[in-house]
Image (tube, grey):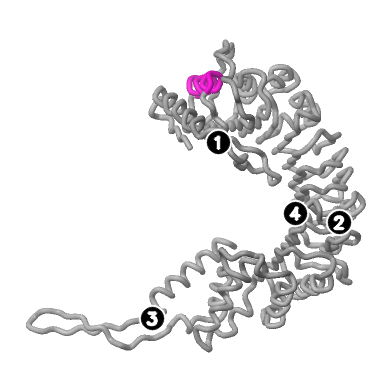
Amino acid sequence: MWKESLKLLIHAMLLCFDCLFHTRFSYYSIGGEFFMQRSNTMKDRISELPDEILVHILSFLSLRNAARSGILSRRWRHLWKSVPSLNFDFVNKLGPGRDSKGLNKYQFVDWVNAVLDLYQGKSLDEFRIHCTLGVDLASSIDSWIHFAIDKKVKRMDLDFLTRLDFFPVSLKYTFPSCNPVETVTSVEYVSLSSCILTLPGIGKFRSLKHLFLDRVELVDEVLQHLLSNCSSLEYLNLQRAAKLVSVKVDASSSKLKCLMIYYCLSLKCVDIYASNLITFTYVGHKVDLKSAPSLTEVSFCVGNHSCEDRLTYAGVQFAGSLHQLEKLVLQVSPHEVSRGIGVLPTLCNLKVLVLWVSSKEDSVTAFIQLLDLSPLLRRLELHLMYLRSQPGPSRTEITSESVHRQLEEVEVGGFFGFEDEIQLLEHVVKNAVALKKIVIDPCRKDLSASGKSVEAGNSFPFNGRLQTARKHAQHFCERIPPSINVVIL
């Protein structure tokens, strides 16, 4: 669908360049030489396009700029009122680069109400609100939600930006404070942030496939009701749900394919019985876990303050899935790998291995043991999250001589250039016969709540450390065969 939309946009833009101010030329000959003369006749041909195409073009603009198109001509005056996506935030109201302090929440509410009163579209693809709003404006927010539902909205993104710790929970908006009476069948995607979710919540959104909850106050019963009633749900992302104690995904969630949980600090247990779940991500402290049997991608990042032997713990928790995993993400130290490697079987289907290293006791060459257990591994990522004040361990003896026949790409983040890091890369170059690319990034990264890597502030106390790391990387590159592409970031 997006490819067809892109093709339509490109085609329309080409028409714009060719037809917006179509200039005619006449040709004449004097003495055998040809001359071209421009006619003064100029014609606006883009306005001759059908409404559907013009509205589709406007949908790629911000709401602010789409509304501005109404001054082009009488033909364009009302087209913006039918755009399929309504995106309300400070940037759309004030324009880029403007301070949001210049707009209070009551002005924001008046703006949204005015736009909705003018709206003429029959349906909505997306409805988005990003503004600091609370319970005092619940009636307005409810009316917006019902407006979107009446327009058969497909995607709903509501972020009330009340993330500060001193913002009382009692002042947060409850979604929705006035629930729809009938079952909602149009909504397929919901993203909620910084609000309260109570029964029945979004349990009547029976076509919901994708649900993202960030800093949403909800208890176990609400989540269970949601899972039981949203039988079409395929993707669930829970972030910073402070009151959740247990997450139980049972057989009623038969279509759920992806479950992601980040920093739910009161969580004690996670029970997964959904037979079709293939992707599970958990970032937080140690919990009791019963995992689904069909997992192929697992991200399991537990801080060492709550679990002393994370590799052994992960090996036990996912014992039934390890043989079929294709991607594995772990937060682990070299010492934990050396101590717990014996609990792991051969990872016979593993193709991607990502290691987040937050503590350092031993040489990173200990991770070679994980490579030896992964005969089909194609990509290795090693993210060093700690700051070293002293050089790493000196060179150690590597007893493994296993050939890594499938390994094609290696990335090392937080690279310092110490001996153990260089030794690990040298081993990979020597034993990975299919190696095509090495990426070396001196910047230290951390796991964000979204599960993606982000720069962890000032990566090095002194800029000289960053330069030194790059020099070590460049010196290492001089010894690499030209067939391997080395990228230094």
Is disc 4 surrounded by few (<14), some (14 to 19) or many (20+) residues within 10 Å? Answer: some
Which of label 4 and label 1 is nearer to you?
1
The reply to whether dot 4 and dot 1 touch (C-beta < 8 Å) is no
Instruction: Point out the tag, 1 or 2, that comes first from the N-terminus.
Output: 2
Q: Does the magenta-highlighted stretch encompass residue 431?
A: yes
Which three-letter amino acid code belongs to the residue tagged 3? Phe
Instruction: Point out the tag, 3 or 1, that comes first from the N-terminus.
Output: 3
Element at badge 2?
helix
Residue 152 image position (x, y, % from top left): 74, 72
Q: Which mark is residue 169?
A: 2
The residue indicated by pointer 1 is 443
Instruction: Point out the tag, 3 or 4, that comes first from the N-terminus.
Output: 3
Q: Which mark is residue 21?
A: 3
Provide the major secondary structure of the magenta segment: helix
Which three-letter amino acid code belongs to the residue tagged 2? Val
Instruction: Point out the tag, 4 or 1, that comes first from the N-terminus.
Output: 4
